[in-house]
Image: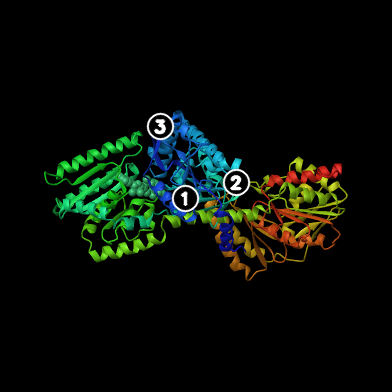
């Protein structure tokens, strides 16, 4: 077993310090302007940028980065290519310990990519506003083009050994595009917005949704904020691409990918320490003084329909309606940062918000009191902090939010442990901030009541709630989040490298062929389904084609070869397909065998007395799960669920195994799990037992076993250590080597055929 911790530590020691980080996001982390021929950089706002920058700056301080190994950040910038180009040396510019590499997207692509597919299709759909999502071919075409431009820029900057970390929904195709050019690169992807339930994701047109999922699977590690998003993603992968996962590791024919939860956080100390800063405190006091004894409710959001601003304002209105005693006693400061204001839905949302504010202020306000104070701007850090500190209540009720950093910032800044957070249960942050007053963002009455509860909450209760939340945020801050992600990414790479070591390379192929050529007595033990032929929907559809029959015939007529097909199939199927060829056949996972030119025999004396007791259970599961069926053989029974609804099929297969395990303690059968099949067979038989019929003669100077399934592991176990065994698919196995996919088997065996017919060494 791999000791992951040790492996990771050694990997870090050997590689991480030397490894450069390449961060890729839609935008660069600085606003860049040009004044009188000089570039000017100012920090840009936004959850992603502020989080990652904090992590990088801390790492930079401790690791003493220089220009050669400082992190690279790739993204777009507002400044035009014409203005930027003269300042770039080999495609990038250095600033604040970052190498910034701008991607230039032509205006013709940018609008349909960013305002179109990103924010008019993916954003509304992933935030559960499907009716706002526009599915336009033009949008998607430009999305593909923009992702290709990002890919080109990454390839331009990439040096072997770099770690590439791609961020967010704008770039979901990039991992797979990169993988085509740099197959062994270390690539991580993090999604900052929710991943929606399968029922919503499936609304994306078929080709696009497949490309998006395959695009993401180009990564080694895919991160989400919450466990729900991970589950939604895994379900979409299973339903749309048909890939299962085992403990969140998705295995495709090419690679294995880890999918996991990494709840993003904030730079906790920046907020807690910042709140004790004198200027900030003076600013906070100024706000308090202006309010006298009026209570303050605060919210901070980007302008976005997903942030639930309309419902929130209506809830505040309802609160004033229900509790007139609070009129003149409470002010709601609504701070909104401008965002995506050329998209129609955003323009409409802004208009609606402003109309609503006028209505509330007109209805309840008077000359001394404005119930809602609206600010449509970005606040600088200290002013933002002062607002958090002055607030009695933070009212954060997005309809959907990947995480929501404002909620965390508010809690972290309250070193006085006062103030109450009202948080939407549909924000990712609610999974970690359970001590907040959690509300349904569509329920105006619940929000109005929550405001009342918050304004009357005893101080001791405020302190207790905030303390618990602060402890959690302090322990898992943004540094931990980023470290955790990068460590997991490296760990996945280590595990993959271990598997890759076993992948059959050209060199290994040649080594095996060399031994084949120089041997006189060869034994080839070949599984059938999934090895010699692709897996099919129904067993009878996976019949051998003419090409395979010819290949097997050619190999078997070479006098030096002994070919044994060793399968779980019943005697009749093998006899029908291969009976006329000079092959040895093994049926029912080793229960029966036939040496060429002789008849069928039972391998060892076993009985099927258990079968009448087991069959009704399998039949019951067939009735309970449409699309499944039982295959009855002489000494084994197989319950196939390949054609069942994927999730239900898997669930029922677990239940069936449980039921069979109980029965097997009293009956003489064993349970084996294959690819979408649960089999029961007489105890004492397996493919290894059957293979020993040939191997015990020890006359073979070349043995090769190939199989794709768990049942083939018994076969691999008995192959002598000096010989060869290969498992199809990049999974952990007793086999010496792995093939990526089934078609690799045939092209490999064809090389045997070629050397057999030419007797020339293969080069
Ligand atoms: P955003 O949708 O941008 O991020 P959020 O997580 O709340 O949402 O981050 C907003 C950031 O901008 C906060 O740091 C906040 O302080 C700042 N901000 C907002 N309004 C401001 C204003 N008027 N003045 C100054 N600063 C302001 C996306 C996802 C989120 C996810 C983050 C990080 O939509 O769900 O939490 O990425 O993954």
Q: Residue 721 — which label?
A: none
Of labels 2 and 1, earlier in sequence is 2
> Which mark identifies residue 37?
3
Q: x, y percentage for residue 610?
A: 67, 66
Q: Position of residue 541 (x, y in %)?
A: 67, 45
Q: Nearer the viewer, residue 92 or 606?
A: 92
Residue ID at (47%, 56%): 62
> Which quadrant: the C terminus?
top right
Q: Nearer the viewer, residue 21 or 693?
A: 21
Nearer-N-terminus badge (3/2) = 3
In the image, which is nearer the foreground, mark 1 or mark 3?
A: 3
Tell us which disc is closer to us: 2 or 1.
2
Where is residue 241? Give x, y as percent: 56, 45
Q: Quadrant of the N terminus?
A: bottom right
239 vs 267, left or right, is right
Inter-mark Cα distance, 3 to 2 = 35 Å
Q: How many other residues sit within 10 Å of disc 3, few (<14), some (14-19) or many (≥20)? A: few
Q: Which residue is mark 2?
A: 160
Tag 3 secondary structure? loop
In space, the residues marked 2 and 1 are separated at their CA atoms by 34 Å
For this rendering, which residue is in front, 57 or 683?
57
Residue 754 drawn at (x, y percent): 82, 42
Sequence-first disc among 1 and 3: 3
Which label belongs to residue 232? 1
The quarter holding residue 637 reads bottom right
Q: 281 or 136: nearer the eye?
A: 281
Residue 733 vs 86, above or below: the answer is below
What separation in Å lies between label 1 and label 3 (alpha carbons)? Answer: 49 Å
């Amino acid at each position: 077993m791999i000791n992951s911790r040790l492996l990771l530590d050694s990997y870090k020691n050997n590689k991480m310090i030397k490894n450069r980080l390449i961060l890729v996001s839609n935008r660069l982390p600085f606003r860049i302007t040009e004044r009188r021929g000089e570039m000017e950089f100012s920090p840009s706002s936004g959850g992603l940028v502020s989080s990652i920058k904090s992590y990088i700056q801390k790492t930079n301080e401790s690791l003493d980065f220089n220009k050669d190994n400082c992190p690279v950040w790739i993204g777009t910038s507002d400044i035009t290519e014409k203005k930027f180009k003269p300042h770039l040396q080999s495609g990038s510019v250095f600033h604040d310990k970052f190498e910034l590499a701008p991607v230039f997207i032509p205006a013709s692509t940018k609008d349909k990519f960013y305002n179109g597919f990103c924010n008019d299709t993916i954003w509304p759909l992933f935030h559960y506003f499907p009716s706002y999502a526009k599915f336009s071919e033009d949008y998607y075409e430009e999305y593909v083009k923009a992702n290709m431009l990002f890919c080109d820029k990454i390839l331009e900057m990439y040096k072997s050994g770099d770690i590439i970390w791609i961020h967010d929904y704008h770039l979901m195709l990039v991992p797979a595009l990169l993988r085509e050019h740099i197959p062994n690169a270390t690539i991580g992807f993090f999604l900052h917005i929710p991943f929606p339930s399968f029922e919503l994701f499936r609304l994306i047109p078929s080709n696009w949704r497949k490309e998006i999922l395959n695009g993401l699977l180009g990564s080694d590690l895919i991160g989400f904020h919450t466990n729900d998003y991970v589950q939604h993603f895994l379900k979409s992968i299973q339903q749309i691409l048909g890939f299962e996962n085992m403990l969140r590791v998705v295995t495709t024919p090419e690679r294995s990918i880890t999918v996991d939860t990494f709840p993003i956080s904030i730079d906790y100390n920046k907020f807690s320490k910042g709140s004790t800063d004198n200027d900030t405190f003076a600013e906070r006091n100024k706000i308090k003084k202006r309010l006298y004894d009026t209570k303050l409710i605060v919210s901070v959001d980007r302008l976005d329909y997903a942030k639930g601003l309309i419902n929130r304002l209506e809830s505040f209105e309802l609160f004033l309606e229900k509790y007139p005693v609070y009129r003149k006693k409470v002010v709601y400061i609504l701070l909104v940062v401008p965002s995506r204001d050329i998209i129609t839905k955003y323009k409409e949302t802004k208009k609606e918000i402003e109309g609503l504010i006028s209505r509330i202020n007109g209805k309840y306000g008077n000359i001394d009191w404005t119930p809602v104070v609206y600010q449509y701007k970005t606040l600088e850090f200290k002013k933002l902090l002062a607002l958090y500190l002055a607030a009695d209540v933070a009212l954060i009720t997005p309809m959907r939010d990947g995480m929501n950093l404002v909620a965390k910032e508010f809690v972290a800044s309250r070193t006085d442990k006062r103030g109450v957070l009202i948080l939407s249960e549909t924000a990712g942050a609610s999974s970690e901030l359970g001590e907040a007053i959690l509300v349904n963002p569509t329920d105006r009455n619940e929000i109005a009541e929550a405001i009342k509860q918050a304004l009357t909450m005893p101080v001791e209760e405020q302190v207790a709630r905030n303390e618990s939340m602060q402890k959690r945020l302090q322990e898992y801050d943004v540094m931990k989040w980023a470290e955790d992600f990068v460590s997991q990414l490296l760990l996945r790479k280590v595990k993959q490298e271990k598997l890759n070591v076993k992948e059959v390379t050209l060199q290994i192929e040649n080594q095996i062929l060399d031994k084949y050529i120089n041997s006189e007595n060869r034994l080839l033990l070949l599984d059938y389904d999934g090895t010699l032929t692709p897996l099919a929907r129904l067993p009878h559809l996976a019949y051998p084609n003419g090409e395979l029959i010819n290949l097997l015939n050619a190999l078997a007529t070479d006098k030096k070869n002994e070919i044994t097909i060793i399968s779980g199939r019943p005697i009749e199927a093998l006899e029908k397909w291969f009976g006329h060829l000079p092959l040895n056949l093994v049926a029912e996972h080793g229960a029966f065998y036939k040496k060429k030119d002789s008849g069928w025999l039972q391998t060892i004396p076993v009985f099927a007395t258990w079968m009448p007791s087991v069959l009704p259970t399998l039949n019951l599961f067939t009735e309970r799960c449409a699309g499944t069926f039982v295959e009855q053989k002489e000494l084994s029974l197989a319950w196939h669920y390949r054609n069942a609804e994927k999730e239900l099929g898997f669930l029922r297969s677990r239940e069936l195994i449980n039921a069979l395990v109980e029965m097997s303690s009293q009956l003489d059968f064993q349970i084996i799990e294959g690819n979408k099949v649960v089999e029961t067979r007489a105890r004492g038989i397996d493919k290894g037992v059957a293979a020993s019929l040939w191997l015990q003669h020890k006359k073979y100077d070349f043995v090769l076993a190939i199989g794709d399934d768990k049942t083939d592991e018994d076969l691999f176990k008995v192959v002598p250590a000096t010989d060869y065994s290969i498992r199809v698919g990049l999974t952990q196995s007793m086999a010496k080597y792995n093939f990526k996919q089934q078609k690799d088997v045939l092209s490999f065996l064809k090389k045997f055929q070629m050397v057999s017919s030419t007797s020339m060494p293969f080069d």
